Image (spheres, rainbow, N blue to C red):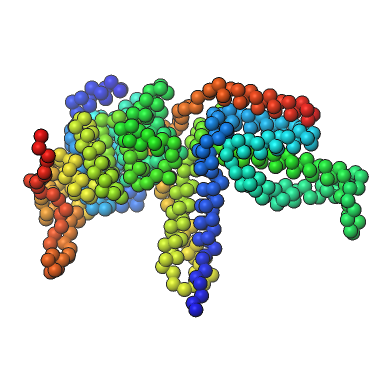
């Protein structure tokens, strides 16, 4: 089965959503008729206002929730509860896909940072030495070696985010699912996070970033899709095209009209918070 | 002059509880500073403290028990634990718990009269010795337990318990309880503080009870949703019901020497105190 999955994934898309809908208990809809295909190596930003279905989409991609209707495939195989109940498929799928939860406190459930980063590798059949090697490497990459014996509840927001990323990096998945990764981060941590995602993209990883932070999407994604407030996927395209469509962004509650003073006079205009692709940088000569 | 605003009893209790848990459960500051016991492998520490506890229980000789208590104090001093804090921590609750249990034994144990009291009461010599033994045994045992907790980070202690064949699943649950009890306590404290910031004047008792009940319900609901999210986060990283841990402990020659030395002392104490 594992070999089958590897063979299938070499030629198949990473995820295929075919008319996928999802509703929580009580028929509260979270996703409506989503169609999306994601190829390996893409960096996709999923944009949407709060409650539009971004987090649900990621949980479906990670095989934690399953569609109420429609079909979902991962690496060319149906991603169903029955498929994940099979040990070899589950092992291979979990080994390939990592999810960063929106609330770091949810993800950091172990007593120390070291235990947290070791949790996923320990679920594999790697030897103790290999697990320790991977943990040390992840701690080094995220520059959090000094936190190894600390309890997660004593960390700052930025540190928690780094530990959560390290806990995925130790498994070195080929697909990263990031749920609002920049939420609550200070500017320096946010800039560091952008660099981290860009590094993963350059290393050939498939990245899916769910966010309502348009500047993050602009920096890290090479494809953007947008959910509206009725949980439908309403746009899918290159960042420059999507992020410059102000009507679309306003309809989806991603930008808004507000007032603030310009040269002493209150003015009203839409605020997309997007940098111009042609904005200038001063680079030192040489 | 306006009246000072009274702090609600439940808010105060919560703040005290958080503070007490911080102080008593983890004692991180002490467990991470340089000292004799802090330098030892936690597994050796557990085994050596257990053997000393056993010798305290089996010893029937007052000088031997006093020596073991002295040893506990010496170990505390060598582990950079402030002695006044250590002694206070052990003896503060001793009169309430052990003292109350032991009190009747002073009077009802048959034997020669030691001190005569009014109303025909008398403390017997045998009763006094029994109470002295009990207090000394309990205080020495509690001291040894406190030594272990104060000089070992809670997380290392949990891991080291696997040497006693405590199931890993149980240790995982204990570790997560330790982790999330804080989060929920802090959430509860925040909830009460935010309530307080919006309360003007004094609440009627019925209203205070209603707020308390509503907050408890909200907290329960939050903890339920948190637990299901945590389980999803575990599943996402490959958890399928079997917990595994990395054994990062390493036995060094000092650990072997310490373990053997303490076990010898414990055996000697049992032999001398038989």
Quadrant position of residue A37:
top left
Q: Position of residue A32 (x, y in %)?
A: 23, 47
Quadrant position of residue A93:
top left
Q: Position of residue A12 (x, y in %)?
A: 19, 28
Can residue B171 be seen from the camera position used here?
no
In the foreground, A26 or A176: A176
- In the image, what residue occupies the spot 47% across and 73% down? B201
Image side of residue A79 versus residue A286, left or right: right
Image side of residue B129 versus residue A90, left or right: right
Where A246 sits versus B110, above or below?
A: below
Total numbered circles: 0
Q: Position of residue A110 (x, y in %)?
A: 44, 38
In the foreground, A185 or B90: B90
Where B186 sits versus A208, above or below?
A: below
- In the image, what residue occupies the spot 23% across and 33% down? A200
Can residue B204 be seen from the camera position used here?
yes
- In the image, what residue occupies the spot 51% across and 52% down? B18
For this orientation, the residue located farthest to the left is A278
In the foreground, B161 or A140: A140
Image side of residue A85 versus residue A200, left or right: right
Quadrant position of residue A181:
top left
The quadrant of the image that shows the C terminus of chain B is: top right
Q: Position of residue A238 (x, y in %)?
A: 12, 42
In the foreground, A18 or B46: B46
- In the image, what residue occupies the spot 51% across and 56% down? B15
Where A109 sits versus B206, above or below?
A: above
């Amino acid at each position: 089965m594992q070999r089958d999955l590897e063979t299938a994934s070499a030629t198949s898309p990473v995820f295929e959503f075919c008319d996928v809908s999802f509703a929580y208990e009580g028929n509260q809809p979270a996703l409506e008729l989503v169609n999306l295909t994601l190829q390996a190596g893409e960096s996709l930003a999923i944009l949407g206002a709060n409650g539009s279905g971004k987090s649900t989409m990621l949980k479906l991609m990670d095989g934690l929730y399953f569609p109420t209707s429609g079909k979902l495939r991962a690496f060319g195989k149906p991603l169903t509860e029955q498929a994940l109940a099979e040990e070899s498929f589950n092992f291979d799928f979990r080994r390939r896909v990592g999810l960063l939860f929106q609330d770091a406190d949810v993800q950091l459930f172990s007593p120390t940072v070291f235990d947290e980063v070791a949790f996923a590798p320990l679920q594999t059949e790697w030897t103790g030495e290999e697990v320790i090697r991977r943990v040390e490497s992840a701690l080094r990459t995220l520059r959090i070696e000094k936190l190894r014996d600390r309890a997660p509840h004593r960390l700052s927001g930025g540190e928690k985010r780094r530990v959560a990323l390290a806990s995925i990096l130790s498994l070195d998945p080929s697909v990263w699912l990031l749920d609002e990764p920049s939420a609550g981060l200070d500017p320096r941590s946010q800039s560091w996070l952008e660099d981290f995602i860009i590094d993963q993209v350059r290393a050939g990883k498939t990245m899916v970033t769910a966010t309502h932070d348009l500047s993050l999407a602009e920096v890290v994604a090479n494809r953007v899709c947008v959910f509206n407030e009725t949980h439908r996927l309403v746009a899918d395209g290159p960042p420059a095209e999507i992020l410059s469509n102000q009507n679309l962004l306003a309809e989806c509650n991603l930008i808004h009209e507000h007032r603030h003073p310009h040269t002493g006079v209150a003015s009203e205009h839409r605020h997309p918070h997007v940098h111009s692709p042609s904005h200038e940088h001063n680079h030192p000569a040489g | 002059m306006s009246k000072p605003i009274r702090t609600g009893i439940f808010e105060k209790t919560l703040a005290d509880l958080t503070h007490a848990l911080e102080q008593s459960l983890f004692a991180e500051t002490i467990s991470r500073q340089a000292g004799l016991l802090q330098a030892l492998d936690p597994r050796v520490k557990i085994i050596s403290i257990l053997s000393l506890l056993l010798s305290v229980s089996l010893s029937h000789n007052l000088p031997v028990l006093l020596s073991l208590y002295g040893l506990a104090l010496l170990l505390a001093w060598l582990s950079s634990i402030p002695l006044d804090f250590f002694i206070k921590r052990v003896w503060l609750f001793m009169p309430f718990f052990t003292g109350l249990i032991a009190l009747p034994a002073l009077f009802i144990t048959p034997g020669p009269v030691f001190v005569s009291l009014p109303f025909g009461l008398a403390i017997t010599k045998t009763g006094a010795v029994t109470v002295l033994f009990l207090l000394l045994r309990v205080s020495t045992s509690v001291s040894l337990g406190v030594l272990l907790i104060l000089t070992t980070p809670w997380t290392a202690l949990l891991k080291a318990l696997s040497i006693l064949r405590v199931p890993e699943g149980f240790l995982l649950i204990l570790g997560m309880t330790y982790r999330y009890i804080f989060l929920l306590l802090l959430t509860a404290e925040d909830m009460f503080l935010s309530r307080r910031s919006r309360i003007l004047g004094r609440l009627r008792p019925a209203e205070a009870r209603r707020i308390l009940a509503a907050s408890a319900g909200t907290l329960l609901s939050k903890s339920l949703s948190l637990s299901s999210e945590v389980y999803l986060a575990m599943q996402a990283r490959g958890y399928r019901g079997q917990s595994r841990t990395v054994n990062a402990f390493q036995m060094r020659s000092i650990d072997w020497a310490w373990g053997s030395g303490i076990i010898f002392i414990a055996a000697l104490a049992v032999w001398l105190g038989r």
